[in-house]
Amino acid sequence: MKSNRKAKRIISAVLCIMLVALTAACGSQPAEETAAMFKAGTYTATTDAHNGELNVEVTVDENTIKEVKVIEHKESPGISDPAIERIPKAIVDEQSLAVDTISGATVTSDAIIVAVTEALKQADADIEALKVKKEDEKGSKETKEYTTDVVVIGGGGAGLAAAVTAHENGAEVLVLEKMPRLGGNTILSGGAYNAVDPGRQSKQEIEDSIEKYYTQTYEGGDKAGNPELIKTLVEGAYPGIEWLEGLGMEFNDEVFTVLGGLWPRAHKPSAPLGTGFIDTYSNYIEENDGIEVLLDTEAKELMMDDDRVVGVKARGIEGDVIVNSNKAVVIAAGGFGANVEMRNQYNEIWPDLTNINTTNHPGATGDGLVMAEGIGANLVGMENIQLLPMGDPETGSLSGNIEQGVENRIFVNKSGNRFVDEGARRDVMTQALMEQEDSFMWVIVDKHSYPTEDTTNNFNETIAELLEQGRAYKGETLEELAEKIDVDADNLVKSVEEFNKAVEKGEPDAFGRTLFADKLDAPPYYAGGRVPTVHHTMGGIEINTKAQVLDKDGNIISGLYAAGEATGGIHGTNRLGGNALADITVFGRIAGENAAKEK
């Protein structure tokens, strides 16, 4: 018995000695260390974005991307904000460069990713490994359901006007916006808002009237617009400005003639682009309970109960979304200028539009029209697609346009010759431009438009910035300018001289132009290139003066309203410049008020 115990003790001792020896051996030989992924530190990099250079700062430790910041950029406010906010966060959250770009801000998104890549190269990162897309680990996505009084499809100017007005009339509101930001085309616009305004116009000795505004709008659309809708528009335009001012928005004191506006009645917001409209609505939403906004949420289908619209089925990042409406749904999802297939389907006026860029944001794809037609709504004027002669040669956007108003500039072709009345309708000017070499023209202005190089255009870009970016050219003489833009100097000089003679006489010139202000006689002179671009789709959902949607037999579809570029029948074959922002405000307000009053 003793020998057995002794044997067990010996065995135990041996095992302990072996264990201790093994432990000691392990302790004396350090474990194999994981190789560092980065060289710890903070790195900066610069790349070209949409409007100029974009700078990032990236901080890493040995194994982690700790922080990504965009420290400097020249991107457009509102448009690029979602990319600047989300892309750096996504890179840190996912520890990857293979992050999704932001719809509507893809150029800015890509620029941020490129700059971060360059910064991480300085940190000795394995860039190819960081570009590998990680699998989605979120699993199945759940359906979310909401119930509210008024559902608004679209977070642009028309939709937000409707949402705010519905709330002012006592309704609870939910806004569905498929893009990652609010704003739609409104935030990209030049901000010009037409309205007869005796207070401002009389100070500039401008004679105007509701009747004149109505006639120009009706005849400017070849009398194809609905007279009652036009009357509602022109009568409601100035009250719309007063309402916006009551919400805190500011407009400049002087009115002007916007491209294709035909008369000096355009009001310019104090804020750049269309940001004043969207900021005003956003401030109201933030300061008041009762309006909820769902971004990245695309409306897919209108829900029906018998013959009444009772809600919307949508799709968000986290899954399906169902929104029930106690009162009504407002469609304000914009037009279809960014949908090449749809605009070619309906185009009956222009040459093939496949390779023509657009001023529209990427979300302007006609979704609201398709949904409405799917439940029997009538679509009118779909063939009426407006092109502008003012597109950026690279992107089609309105940015970079050096004109300040219609009266102080001329257009010349690549030969340096004028070719159209620069105060004419937009379709007339664009058709004339398409007949020029390469469908290309130069806008010519002088010091009257840019007293200093810090003076901004209608898109908050200084002429100095445009010169630096090669989007504008400057000459102390017309001959110098002609050399820089490669046009015949004699032709350019003659074009300006003939224009100046017409200004002196104050009579129609050889092209029939009657809108003049200053002569082009104050150096330096500036030129900026422009091409045709798809701008506005006048066709859409048929509505009445209460913004109620009509079916193909002219009957009201209960519980459904529409406003803005999603509607048709207001502008006819051609929309006057400056009428879109008036339209979305007037009919957005009407739609919101009546939706809130639905039983």
Image (cartoon, helix red, strand yellow):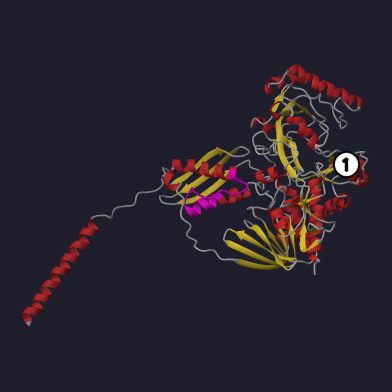
Outermost residue on the top side: it is 490
Q: Amino acid at mark 1?
A: Glu
**Toward which corner of the image does residue 455 lie, by quadrant?**
top right
Q: At x 81% / y 29%, what residue is drawn? A: 420
Q: For this view, does 491 lie left or right of residue 317?
A: right
Q: Residue furthest front?
A: 553
Is residue 514 located in the magenta-colored stretch of the structure?
no
The answer to which of 214 and 382 lies nearer the viewer is 382
**Residue at the image position 48 percent from the left and 54 percent from the top:** 94
Farthest residue, direction bottom: 1
**Observer able to see residue 446:** no
Depicted 37 relative to depicted 149: above or below: above
Q: Which residue is mark 1?
A: 219
What residue sits 44% from the left and 41% below the top? 121
Q: Position of residue 166 (x, y in %)?
A: 78, 62
Measured as percent of width and height from the top left, residue 360 is found at 69, 44
137 sits to left or right of 309: left
Instruction: Choose between 192 and 369: the one closer to the eye.
Output: 369
Q: Give the left or right position of residue 537, taking residue 339 as reference.
A: right
Mark 1 residue crowding within 10 angstroms, few (<14) / some (14–19) / many (20+)? some
Q: Position of residue 475 (x, y in %)?
A: 72, 23
> Magenta stretch?
87-106
Is residue 30 at all visible to an observer of this figure? yes
Give the answer, above or below, for where 487 lies relative to 380: above
Foreground: 20 or 277? 277
> Quarter of the image containing the C terminus?
bottom right
Decide: is 24 above or below 251.
below
| Residue found farthest to the left | 3
Percent across and percent down for residue 145 are: 63, 67
Q: Quadrant of the N terminus?
A: bottom left
Q: Secondary structure at mark 1?
A: helix
Magenta-drawn stretch contains 88: yes
